[in-house]
Image (tube, grey):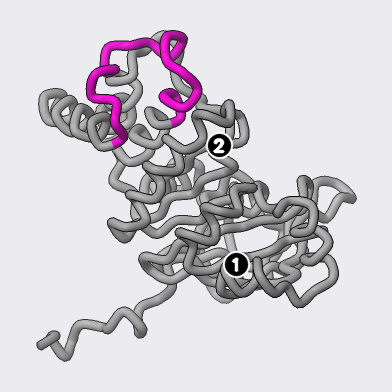
Amino acid sequence: MSDATTPSAAARAPMVLADRVSKSFGSNEVLKSISLEVKHGEVMCLVGPSGSGKSTFLRCINHLEVVNSGRLMVDGDLIGYRETGGRLYELAPKDAARQRRDIGMVFQRFNLFPHMTALENVMEAPLRVKKMAKARVEQDARALLARVGLADRADYYPAHLSGGQQQRVAIARALAMEPKLMLFDEPTSALDPELVGEVLDVMKGLAKEGMTMIVVTHEMGFAREVADSLVFMDGGVVVESGDPDEVLSNPQHRRTQAFLSKVL
C-alpha cells in the first residue's frame, strides 16, 4: 500500500512540459507556440519533414537554444530561467549547465572525442563534472559499455569503431551522467542501413527499463513499436499527435497524410 503522502504517478508534474514555446532565428520563426507534455517513463517520438522544428525543440529543452517566448519545464523545474516577481531572468551559464546534467542528449553525429578511447569518452563527464572517484567511474563506464553491447571495445578509439558502435558509445556517455530524461536527435540518420538496428535495439532496451525519452526519428517502425505517443510537426507547429499506431494507420490531417504517404 502506497504512502498517503507520496504523490501518485498521475499527480506528479510531467517530466517535460512545454507551454506555448516559440523560437525564431532572425525573421525565421522555427517554433510557433508549441505546447505538449511528456509523462515520466513515456517515450515520445517526434516526426515530420526536415526544417519542421523538431531538432530545435529538443535543443530548447536543455537550453542549448534560448526560447523567445513560452516556458519549458523538466520534472517541475523551469529550464534556463528563474522567475522573480512574475518576470523571467535567464540563468547564468553555470546554473544552466547544472540543469543540463539531468538531461542526456544523443546527436545525429556522434560527437565523440577522437583522442579518447570508448571507455575514456564515457568516463569524461562523471570525472570532470561530478568529480567522482576514478575507480568508481571506470567500473560504471565499463558496465555501461557492456549494456550497449561494447564491453570488448572499451579500449578502441572512435576511428576504429563503426558508426553504429560510435553511436552506442555516445548513448553510454549520455547515460553515464544518470539522466532523468534522454533526448535523441535523429540518432540513426547518419548510419549505414545495416547498422541502424543495433542502435535502435539499445534504445528499445532503455524504453523497457522506463527511461523517459523524446526521439526525433524517421524510423516509423521504431515509433510504432516503442513510442507511447507520436507527434507530427510541420512548419514549427504540432499538426497532429496521439497513439502512434492510430496516427500512423489513420492520420486525420492532410499534412500528416501527405508526409506519411512518402515515408511508409
Label 2 near label 1: C-beta < 8 Å?
Answer: no
Sequence order check, earlier mark of 1 and 2? 1
Q: Secondary structure at mark 1?
A: strand
Q: In x, y percent, where is residue 247?
A: 65, 71
In the rendered image, the quadrant that contains the N terminus is bottom left
- Against 190, is 183 above or below? below
Residue 177 lies left or right of residue 221; in this view the side is left
Q: Is residue 162 magenta?
A: yes
**Residue found farthest to the bottom:** 4
Q: In x, y percent, where is residue 97?
A: 44, 43
Q: Is residue 30 magenta?
A: no
Residue 223 lies left or right of residue 180; in this view the side is right
Q: Residue at x 85, y 70 (%)?
A: 254
Using the image as rendered, state which of residue 45 and residue 135 is in the foreground.
45
Q: Secondary structure at mark 2?
A: loop
What amino acid type should be assigned to the residue bearing mark 1?
A: Arg
Real-space Cα distance between discs 1 and 2? Answer: 29 Å
Residue 77 visible in the displayed image: no
Using the image as rendered, state which of residue 253 and residue 72 is in the foreground.
253
Q: Residue at x 27, y 29 (%)?
A: 145
Residue that numbered label 2 is attached to: 188
Q: Residue at x 45, y 56 (%)?
A: 213
Write down the quadrant of residue 12 in the picture.
bottom left
Q: Residue at x 34, y 34 (%)?
A: 172
Residue that numbered label 1 is attached to: 71
What amino acid type should be assigned to the residue bearing mark 2?
A: Thr
Mark 2 crowdedness (10 Å alpha carbons): few <14, some 14-19, many ≥20: many
Tell me which segment is drawn in magenta.
Answer: 148-167
